[in-house]
Image: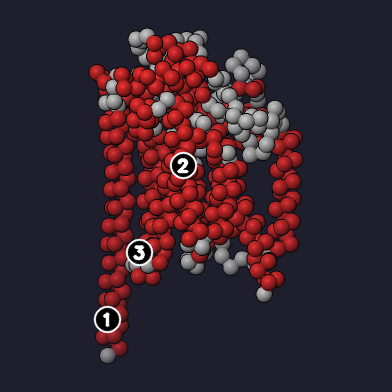
């Protein structure tokens, strides 16, 4: 009798394991299918929107050229020049690319993403001349997908550059308000407050003044509300599921986000589409008491990071490989050279051409402190000493709060949030040339650090106040 019972139990275990394995395989297939579908949709939309003729864009392109001519390349919107500096240079090039898409040779034109800019001439002068005269694009910019054209080309039919920027800002605002409503309605109010304050600290409003800055925030603002809804639904039915449902939801969203980020972003604050999504996942997971051991959470973090990064890298490499086949090896090797430059290229004092080249130590350390410094309200000058004093002051306050109000943590949430929050610093170090030169927009990747710092330190205070009330 005992043998019969054991056989039944073993049979049920084997059957259950087979069902679980089969379900996991099906779920992973769905993840791959969603990723492939994302890639196909992106590319198809890129070519479809490229059929919009130049004539439909002409009027607003002329207005945009006038705008660029009347403004500095790196103008600043407020007196706090570092945190509110525009990048009219990048936007002007992107607008130039959009204007020069050639319907008669669409495949080469879209992949090459060329623009008109004779040597020793400013991009604003070149674009202004291009919209007034029939010229051929002469500068290749094929290393990026420039997928933002999917949104921008239709918008330029209706608006000039200021209107297009405003629309993108409004989209981010609407999606952010929706996300905040979801958080408050579902009793995640404190995280909602931290998230809103974090956005203000990285000058989210600048997305309405620069297309380049807006792209990763458009993706993130569209990504977070559905991720929140899917995760809460998945965790609610967690006990009924034979597989790790919430993780698969997360991985599917991260894979699609990585693909779309590589498709539309100009290498600005790309990591926020991973870091903020993962922070949201951890906070929801903690709410449902599903946090596992530190080792298991670190493994999930690593897998999630690899899925996002793998999707991002695959999309970039796909563009390079297609360019290699269609445009030739020069386009491919130019992309590789630019990638190497972003990681270890020389940088000059004040980012001025012809100025003294900074040392490797100054470039690498500057990639960190210059980005951190943009969080603070510097006006005419930003120095290492002043940045260090700001950081030290905040560090002292945070340490005091932790030391006075800390308590034994039952889960590893705090450690995992810390691990996610330091990712931007690794990004700054790996792409140190890029982060040193373009610190005035790459610093927005620190959004996750600001949100986590507020959430954790504020949590200590709230727990202390609740304890005293009792």
User: Looking at the image, is mark 2 or mark 3 earlier in the sequence?
Assistant: 2
Dot 3 falls on a residue whose secondary structure is loop
Taking 314 as reference, is 337 left or right? Answer: right
Q: Are marks 2 and 1 in contact (CB under 8 Å)?
A: no
Residue 2 falls in image quadrant: bottom left
Which is nearer the eye, 207 or 252? 207
Q: Position of residue 210 (x, y in %)?
A: 50, 30
Residue highlighted by disc 3 = 243
User: Residue, x 61% and y 66% (percent of image)?
Assistant: 409
Q: CA distance from mark 2 to mark 1?
A: 56 Å
**Residue 288 falls left or right of residue 401:** left
Kindly identify which residue carries mark 2: 172
Please name which of the two marks, 2 or 1, marks the residue nearer to the observer: 2
Q: Which mark is residue 8?
A: 1
Relative to 43, is 363 on the left or the right? right
Viewer-side residue, 212 vs 164: 164
Task: Write the residue at 45% across / 18% down.
Answer: 65
- Identify the image quadrant of the N terminus: bottom left
Element type where label 1 sits in the image: helix
How far apart are labels 2 and 3 at the CA level? 34 Å
Left or right, 184 with respect to 247, comes to right
Residue 256's spot in the image, x, y percent?
37, 45
Rounded to the nearest whole Å, what is the CA distance between mark 3 and mark 1?
23 Å
Residue drawn at x 31%, y 68% is: 17
């Amino acid at each position: 009798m005992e043998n019969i019972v054991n056989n039944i139990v073993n049979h049920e275990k084997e059957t259950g394991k087979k069902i679980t394995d089969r379900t996991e395989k099906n779920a992973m297939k769905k993840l791959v299918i969603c990723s492939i579908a994302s890639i196909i949709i992106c590319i198809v939309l890129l070519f479809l929107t490229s059929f919009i003729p130049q004539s439909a864009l002409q009027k607003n392109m002329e207005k945009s050229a006038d705008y660029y001519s009347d403004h500095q390349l790196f103008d600043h919107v407020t007196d706090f020049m570092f945190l509110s500096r525009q990048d009219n240079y990048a936007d002007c090039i992107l607008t130039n690319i959009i204007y020069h898409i050639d319907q008669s040779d669409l495949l080469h034109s879209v992949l090459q993403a060329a623009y008109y800019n004779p040597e020793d001439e400013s991009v604003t002068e070149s674009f202004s001349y291009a919209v007034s005269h029939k010229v051929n694009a002469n500068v290749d910019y094929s290393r990026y997908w420039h997928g933002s054209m999917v949104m921008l080309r239709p918008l330029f039919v209706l608006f000039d550059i200021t209107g297009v920027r405003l629309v993108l800002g409004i989209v981010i605002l609407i999606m952010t308000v929706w996300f905040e409503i979801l958080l408050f309605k579902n009793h995640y109010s404190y995280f909602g407050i931290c998230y809103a304050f974090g956005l203000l600290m990285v000058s989210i409003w600048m997305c309405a003044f620069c297309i380049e800055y807006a792209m990763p925030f458009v993706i993130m603002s569209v990504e977070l509300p559905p991720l929140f809804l899917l995760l809460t639904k998945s965790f609610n039915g967690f006990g009924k599921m034979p597989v790790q449902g919430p993780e698969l939801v997360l991985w599917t969203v991260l894979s699609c986000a990585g693909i779309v980020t590589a498709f539309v972003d100009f290498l600005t604050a790309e990591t926020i589409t991973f870091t903020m999504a993962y922070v949201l996942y951890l906070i929801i997971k903690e709410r449902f008491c599903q946090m596992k051991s530190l080792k298991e959470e670190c493994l999930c973090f690593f897998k999630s990071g690899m899925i996002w990064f793998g999707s991002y890298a695959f999309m970039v490499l796909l563009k390079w490989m297609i360019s290699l086949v269609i445009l030739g090896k020069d386009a491919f090797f130019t992309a590789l050279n630019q990638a190497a430059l972003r990681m270890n290229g020389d940088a000059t004092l004040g980012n001025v051409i012809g100025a003294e080249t900074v040392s490797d130590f100054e470039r690498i350390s500057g990639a960190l402190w210059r980005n951190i410094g943009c969080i603070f309200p510097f006006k005419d000058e930003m120095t290492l000493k002043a940045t260090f004093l700001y950081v030290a002051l905040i560090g002292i306050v945070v340490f005091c709060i932790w030391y006075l109000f800390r308590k034994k943590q039952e889960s590893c949430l705090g450690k995992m949030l810390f691990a996610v929050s330091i990712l931007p610093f690794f990004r700054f170090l790996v792409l140190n040339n890029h982060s040193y030169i373009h610190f005035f927009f790459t610093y927005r990747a620190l959004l996750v650090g600001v949100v986590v710092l507020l959430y954790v330190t504020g949590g200590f205070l709230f727990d202390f106040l609740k304890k005293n009330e009792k």
